[in-house]
Amino acid sequence: PIFAKGDPPTSLFALISGTVKISISSPDGRNAILNLIGPGEIFGEMALLSNWVRSADATANTNCELFTIDRREFVPFVRSQPTLAMKFIELLCERLRSTSDQVEQVILQDLPGRLASVLLRLTERRKLTEGERTLAITQQEISEMVGMTRESINKQLRAWATRGWVRLEHGALVVLKAEPLQALIEAGPDDSD
Ligand code: CMP
């Protein structure tokens, strides 16, 4: 654990290497993953900028190298730098947009659409190009991002693997064809099920 939901904020984090999971959990032990942070991204800005407690748990998913900036230095620095403040506004808008997409999918999409959206969002965010769209993610983590059981995620991924859209590896997934996944999202839920 790096910090937990409800903790008072001490610093802002920038990830140099590794993966950090941003998640929330229910009292009965279920998890929802809100975001996976990759190298070059920052996290922990919300509690600092709003002067409130941490909004979610942050956990190192792999060995991580982190750069931290103390709250007492960060806040005055942002106040004195309008360009930097604008960058944080952009980042927060991007996170809000991504959360709105997730809400839209939970309410309006079926499992294939939700799963396809998560896979494309992860490959696009990491700017992975054709041929190297390998996501270091387990099916359990995907299930916690999509909000469906691991068994149903596994069944759907196997069907797509048979069609050559994805390849399943141990602890990883390779997106081989983004176009049919995109088409599936745009077509919306299949009402014939
Ligand atoms: P903070 O509230 O300080 O601690 C948890 C961090 O997780 C938060 O700052 C953001 O950096 C990040 N975070 C929280 N909610 C989301 C979300 N919905 N999407 C992406 N990142 C988030």
Image (tube, rainbow, N blue to C red):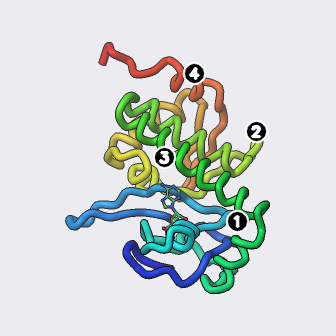
Q: Which mark is residue 130?
A: 2
Amino acid type for the residue under numbered disc 4: Ala
Mark closest to the chain's N terminus, 2 or 1: 1
Mark closest to the chain's N terminus, 2 or 3: 3
Distance between the alpha carbons at the discs numbered 1 and 4? 29 Å
Q: Are marks 2 and 3 in contact (CB under 8 Å)?
A: no
In this view, the residue farthest toward the top is 192
Distance between the alpha carbons at the discs numbered 2 and 3? 26 Å
- Which residue is denoted by mark 4 in the rendering? 183
Distance between the alpha carbons at the discs numbered 4 and 2? 17 Å
Amino acid type for the residue under numbered disc 2: Glu
Disc number lying in front (2 or 1): 1
Amino acid type for the residue under numbered disc 3: Thr
Q: Is residue 118 found left or right of 179 in the rendered image?
A: left
Mark closest to the chain's N terminus, 1 or 4: 1
Residue 84 percent location from the top left of the image: 75, 64
Q: Is mark 3 within 8 Å of ligand 1?
A: yes
Residue 128 percent location from the top left of the image: 73, 47
Q: Are marks 4 and 2 in contact (CB under 8 Å)?
A: no
Mark closest to the chain's N terminus, 3 or 4: 3
Mark closest to the chain's N terminus, 4 or 2: 2
Determine the image quadrant of residue 104.
Answer: top left
Residue 6 percent location from the top left of the image: 37, 75
Q: Which mark is residue 39?
A: 1
Disc number lying in front (2 or 3): 3
- Which residue is denoted by mark 3 in the rendering? 99
| Residue at 44% in and 81% down | 8
Q: Secondary structure at mark 1?
A: loop
Residue 64 percent location from the top left of the image: 63, 77
